[in-house]
Amino acid sequence: MPVITLEMGPLTTEQKEKLIVAFTRDVCEVTGMPPEAMVVLIHELSRDNMGVAGQQVSKMRR
């Protein structure tokens, strides 16, 4: 059973749904596995817990 994991900042419910559909569709197309075999996990990270170029993302977005 393939597990696809995505870690990123906050997403809307609609964005999560689109990602789950797209990841499942694409992996099934490439591997030939059925959608029932796919698991998609989305780990949302607080922007306070992410840094880019030495800066906290929450402060960069202000």
Image (cartoon, helix red, strand yellow):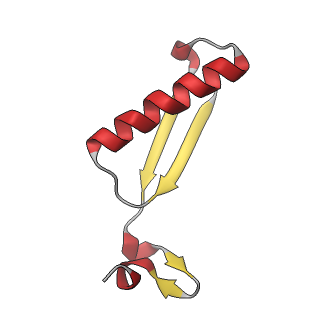
Q: In what quadrant of the picture does the N terminus appear?
A: top right
In the displayed structure, 16 sits above or below 51; it is: above
- Viewer-nearest residue: 14 or 43: 14
> In the image, residue 57 lies at what x, y percent?
43, 78
Residue depicted at 57% across the width and 17% down the height: 37
Left or right: 55 in relation to 26: left
Give the total of numbered labels: 0
Q: Please provide percent x and percent y for residue 14.
A: 29, 39
Q: Residue at x 72, y 19 (%)?
A: 31
Question: For the point 53% across and 48% down, which residue is it?
Answer: 6
> Is residue 1 something one can see in this rendering?
no
| Residue 29 in view of the camera | yes
Furthest residue toward right: 31
**Image location of residue 20, percent across then percent down:** 45, 33
The outermost residue toward the left is 13
Quarter holding the C terminus is: bottom left
Q: Residue at x 35, y 43 (%)?
A: 15
Rendered location of residue 52, percent (x, y): 55, 79
Front residue of 25 and 56:
25
